[in-house]
Amino acid sequence: MTTGETRRPRVGVMGGTFDPIHHGHLVAASEVAQSLDLDEVVFVPTGQPSYKTNVTEAEHRYLMTVIATASNPRFTVSRVDVDRAKPTFTIDTLRDLRRERADADLFFITGADAIAQILSWKDVAELWELAHFVAVSRPGHVLSIHGLPEQDVSLLEVPALAISSTDCRDRVRRGFPVWYLVPDGVVQYISKHHLYRSVE
Ligand SMILES: Nc1ncnc2c1ncn2[C@@H]1O[C@H](COP(=O)(O)OP(=O)(O)OP(=O)(O)O)[C@@H](O)[C@H]1O
Ligand SMILES: O=C(O)c1ccc[n+]([C@@H]2O[C@H](COP(=O)([O-])O)[C@@H](O)[C@H]2O)c1
């Protein structure tokens, strides 16, 4: 960059169902932000996820995401997917964020399990034009760029946290603690709103 040129903001986008958000999500976003020198990471809870059924009400998942990210000045939360009255597809997420952040470069963050499925995502050819994709390691999943466009996808090893939302929900349902798997405020939110007590 020559003197006088302004740097384009570098914005990470962490999409997820976040049912509930846990420390695996937060560590992934933090590590990518550090490694790619991001100015901000926007967490985007899905509205109605396209491939998951029986998820918790979007407003609860959104509020838990706000609570979990509140203490990090680089983390923000977007309602673009929660407020869209149709199933969530990343193509729509990125189109909306591009409109809002026309001056920024977007970096969509996924785990190793999600990137392995990406070729089946809606309008995948256009996804590469809207953002660079950063896939992070996740215990139990192979992190691979095989079959993906190398110029559009980066891989990053992050500290291994064997945490999943499925396991957190299951622990709450069985009466086991989720302290230290999810942020303290999220533990309290789950308890206050009696989430995950029974299988819907
Ligand atoms: N422990 C983890 N380490 C690294 N990446 C993760 C981890 N948990 C989730 N991710 C990634 O975060 C994104 C959002 O994940 P999601 O909200 O579906 O959580 P999950 O734990 O996979 O949920 P569930 O168990 O309900 O399927 C996905 O790209 C996923 O791969
Ligand atoms: O666009 C798609 O076709 C698509 C299919 C599956 C998942 N995604 C996105 O991948 C992210 C993680 O999804 P999930 O279901 O694992 O929480 C989230 O942002 C989803 O919107 C996107």
Image (cartoon, rainbow, N blue to C red):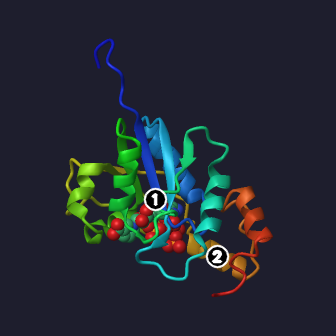
Determine whether 141 is above or below 96 in the image: below
Task: Identify which residue is drawn at 28% across, 15% down.
Answer: 2
> Observer-nearest residue: 174 or 192?
192
- x and y percent of residue 123 in the render? 24, 65
Task: Identify which residue is drawn at 47% across, 62% down.
Answer: 81
Name the residue carrying label 2.
Answer: 169
Determine whether 103 is above or below 32 in the image: above
Of the image marks 2 and 1, the number of the one nearer the N terminus: 1
- x and y percent of residue 169 in the render? 64, 76
- Relative to 59, 151 lies left or right: left
Helix or strand or loop: what does disc 1 sit on? Answer: strand
Q: Residues within 10 Å of mark 1 (few under 14, many from 20)?
A: many
Q: Residues within 10 Å of mark 2 (few under 14, many from 20)?
A: many
* Residue 135 seen: no
Q: Amino acid at mark 1?
A: Gly
Residue 15 is marked as 1
> Observer-nearest residue: 100 or 188?
100
Which image quadrant is residue 148 in? bottom left
Which image quadrant is residue 32 in? top left
Mark 2 to mark 1 CA distance (whole Å): 19 Å
- x and y percent of residue 102 in the render? 35, 40
Question: The C terminus appears in which quarter of the rendering?
Answer: bottom right
Helix or strand or loop: what does disc 2 sit on? Answer: helix
Q: In the image, ligand 2 is in what quadrant?
A: bottom left
Q: Amino acid at mark 2?
A: Arg
Q: Is mark 2 within 8 Å of ligand 1?
A: yes
Q: Is mark 1 within 8 Å of ligand 2?
A: yes
Q: Residue furthest top?
A: 3
Determine whether 141 is above or below 133 in the image: below
Question: The N terminus appears in which quarter of the rendering?
Answer: top left
